[in-house]
Amino acid sequence: MSDNATPLHLGQTSSLPASPEEAVLDYVPNPRPQALYMVRFAAPEFTSLCPVTGQPDFAHLVIDYAPGETIVESKSLKLFLGSFRNHCGFHEDVTVGIGERLFNEMAPKWLRIGGYWYPRGGIPIDVFWQSGTPPEGLFLPDQGVAPYRGRG
């Protein structure tokens, strides 16, 4: 997370980080910290690398969170997710790692991530993680990603 009071990426020219570890996520004050609401980010063209073959893996990520005192700045999130293009990791590790990093740094009231990975070896893998029980009264729409069916 950026230690600066001013986000590093907002309104600035930024390069794609070389790795997720080097990526800096910026957070800005939540304009409505007392309100219970949900924010959704969808990354339908997420890419990382298979740690066994080095070949690209593709996923549709859906990140839902109920903000606390801060919200994640979307440009920094885009750069963070893009930094996985040259990162080797199993689907489970990548999906859960993204969710945990966002939750630990941003400290939202609640967060969930769905990683809908396209088939590898003929088997699609869907990975889900959430920070705990959603707050009572939080509107939780379905993530809207249909199970992979191929030609079925």
Image (cartoon, grey):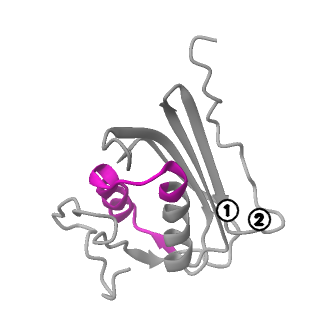
Q: Report whether 22 appears left or right of 151.
A: left
Q: Is residue 122 above or below residue 131?
A: above
13 up-or-down from 144: above or below: below
Q: Quadrant of residue 146?
A: top right
Q: Which amino acid does the dot numbered 2 rest on?
A: Pro
- Counting the numbered discs, the total is 2
Q: Position of residue 140 (x, y in %)?
A: 74, 52
Work out how far the residue at label 1 is from the one at label 2, CA to CA, in angstroms. Answer: 9 Å
- Majority secondary structure of the magenta segment? helix
Determine if the magenta segment contains residue 132: no
- Residue positioned 65% across, 58% down in the render: 129
Q: Is residue 140 left or right of residue 38?
A: right
Q: Are marks 1 and 2 in contact (CB under 8 Å)?
A: yes
Q: Residue at x 35, y 53 (%)?
A: 88
Hey, what amino acid is under mark 1?
Gln
Locate the C terminus and report the quarter of the image it occupies. top right
* Residue 10 found in image quarter: bottom left
Residue 134, label in figure: 2
Query: Magenta residues?
Result: 71-94
Q: Using a 10 Å C-alpha cutoff, classify the residue at mark 2 as few (fewer than 14 neighbours), some (14 to 19) or many (20 or more).
A: some
Q: Nearer the viewer, mark 1 or mark 2?
A: 1
